[in-house]
């Protein structure tokens, strides 16, 4: 397998018998340490994507490896119908920190959001005369199951895999007036990302979530915060809702929560927790191996000074990107903490990301004109400098005027 990949750096979509869901570079990754990833040729890459904001402590961090090793030796999986200790400990920690009362563990963000949608619909049936519609936003992203695709506002998704799951009217992100106008007797909830991630790191400003909280209270409907990308310290607070002191009724977590392993969660206030036995479940949900990993991550994120360091690193990254932008005549820097985007001022983001990969830097291009930065939360200033140096060189090579 590795020799086949070594033969060429040309993109061969059918190199291996894997369904072609995206264009993968023709190399095989074999090792990761902190902010660095290595392929089978021994080439090192500085990783500012980290598995899509997933490896929040970097690649193979010691506390996570130790927790997985110890738990694997003790108990990997009992049953979702039994309690296990890491499940209980992580549930206790996350409910206490979020101010929400109960948690349901899942294996992916989409599954957590799917659970949030089910919970809101059940609540609407019990308490709001069968209301089931969930208002979501244009360009929002909530996952790739049928319902979460319908909840997402991604361009081109409306016509995929018909028939589409009904009940997700869309409003522009950041628009409180349009949201209030969209509320009807059928509305049960509003569901948003505090900062839109896949849309290209779009920050709606600090008045938006408090505005939505007031609106949803006034109309007696639920506020669902999808914190799958923004949660777990990514923006410098444990949950991005904390920046504007908003308490949602339902919150979903994923990505950074497991530090690299599949772990996600749905949290809710007690009065919303209306699942009956059999309404919700999942074979692997809350298994001790994954929740032990989540607990190890949680213990690192809650160490004194950890979140302050994320904010400091975020500020350092913003300054560096702003200086680079000024030097090359590019656009603005968006985002918060270690979730940021740079507007390149021209639709060359895919070219820049490809050239960066060649130069040993992993970056993501969420939009034709923007790069996204989501490094490990413990990234060093030296690593940020190194990233900026490579990016400076790459941008210098790519003509931005077409
Ligand atoms: C990544 C993401 C999801 C989907 O999570 P998966 O684990 O890929 O299913 C949902 N919502 C947001 C905001 C995300 O960033």
Image (tube, rainbow, N blue to C red):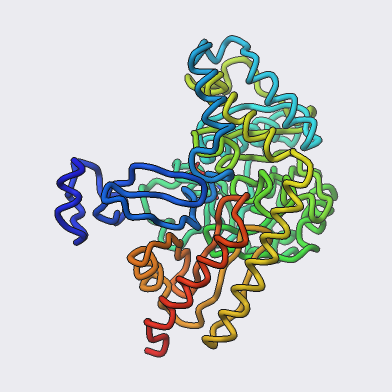
Residue 126, percent from left and from top: 72, 28
Residue 76: where, in percent of width, then height?
49, 16
Choose between 186 and 374: the one closer to the eye: 374
Q: Is residue 59 left or right of residue 207?
A: left
The residue that appears at 49% across and 50% down in the rendered structure is 50
What residue is drawn where x is 51% and y is 46%? 34
* Residue 93 vertical placement versus 383 (above, below): above
Residue 21 image point, x, y percent: 31, 49
Residue 280 falls in which quadrant of the image? top right
Q: Is residue 240 left or right of residue 347?
A: right
Residue 162 shows in this picture: yes
Q: Residue at x 36, y 63 (%)?
A: 357
Left or right placement of residue 376 versus residue 183 in this view: left
User: Which sits in the foreground, 33 or 113?
Assistant: 33
Up-down relation of residue 312 to residue 65 (above or below): below
Could you tell me which residue is drawn at 54 percent across and 88 percent down? 329
Rendered position, 90 above or below 197? above
Quadrant of the drawing holding the N terminus:
top left
Could you tell me if residue 114 is visible in this image?
no
Q: Is residue 269 above or below residue 246?
A: above
Dividing the image into 4 quarters, which one contains the C terminus? Answer: bottom left
Numbered disc total:
0
Residue 272 in percent (x, y) is at: 75, 31
Task: Between residue 310 and residue 257, name the one nearer to us.
Answer: 310
Q: Between residues 14 and 318, which one lies in front from this camera angle?
A: 318
């Amino acid at each position: 397998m590795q020799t086949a990949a070594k033969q060429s750096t040309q993109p061969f979509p059918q190199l291996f018998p894997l369904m072609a869901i995206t264009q993968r570079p023709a190399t095989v990754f074999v090792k990761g340490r902190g902010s660095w990833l290595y392929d089978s040729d021994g080439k090192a890459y500085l990783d500012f994507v980290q598995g899509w904001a997933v490896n929040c402590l970097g690649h193979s961090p010691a506390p996570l490896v130790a927790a997985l090793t110890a738990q694997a030796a003790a108990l990997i999986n009992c049953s979702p119908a039994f309690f296990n200790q890491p499940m209980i400990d992580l549930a206790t920690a996350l409910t206490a920190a979020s101010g929400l009362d109960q948690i349901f563990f899942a294996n992916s963000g989409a599954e957590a959001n799917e659970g949030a949608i089910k919970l809101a619909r059940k609540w609407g049936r019990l308490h709001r005369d069968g209301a089931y519609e969930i208002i979501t936003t244009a360009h929002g992203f909530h996952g790739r199951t049928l319902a979460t695709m319908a909840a997402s506002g991604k361009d081109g998704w409306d016509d995929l895999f018909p028939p589409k799951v009904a009940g997700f009217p869309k409003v522009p992100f950041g628009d409180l007036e349009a949201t209030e106008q969209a509320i009807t007797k059928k509305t049960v909830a509003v569901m948003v990302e505090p900062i839109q991630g896949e849309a290209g790191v779009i920050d709606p400003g600090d008045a938006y979530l408090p505005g939505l909280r007031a609106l949803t209270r006034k109309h007696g409907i639920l506020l669902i915060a999808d914190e799958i990308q923004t949660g777990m310290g990514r923006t410098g607070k444990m949950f991005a809702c904390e920046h504007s002191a908003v308490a949602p009724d339902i919150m979903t977590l994923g990505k950074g929560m497991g530090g690299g392993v599949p772990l996600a969660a749905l949290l809710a206030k007690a009065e919303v927790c209306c699942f009956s036995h059999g309404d919700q479940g999942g074979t692997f949900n809350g298994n001790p191996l994954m929740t032990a990993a989540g607990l190890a991550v949680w213990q690192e994120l809650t160490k004194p000074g950890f979140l302050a360091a994320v904010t400091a690193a975020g500020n350092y990254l913003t300054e560096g990107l702003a200086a680079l932008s000024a030097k090359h005549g590019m656009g603005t820097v968006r985002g918060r903490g270690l979730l940021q985007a740079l507007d390149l001022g021209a639709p060359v983001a895919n070219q820049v990301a490809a050239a960066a990969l060649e130069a040993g830097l992993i970056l993501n291009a969420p939009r034709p004109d923007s790069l996204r930065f989501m490094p490990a939360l413990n990234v060093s200033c030296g690593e940020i400098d190194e990233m900026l140096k490579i990016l400076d060189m790459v941008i210098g090579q790519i003509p931005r005027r077409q």
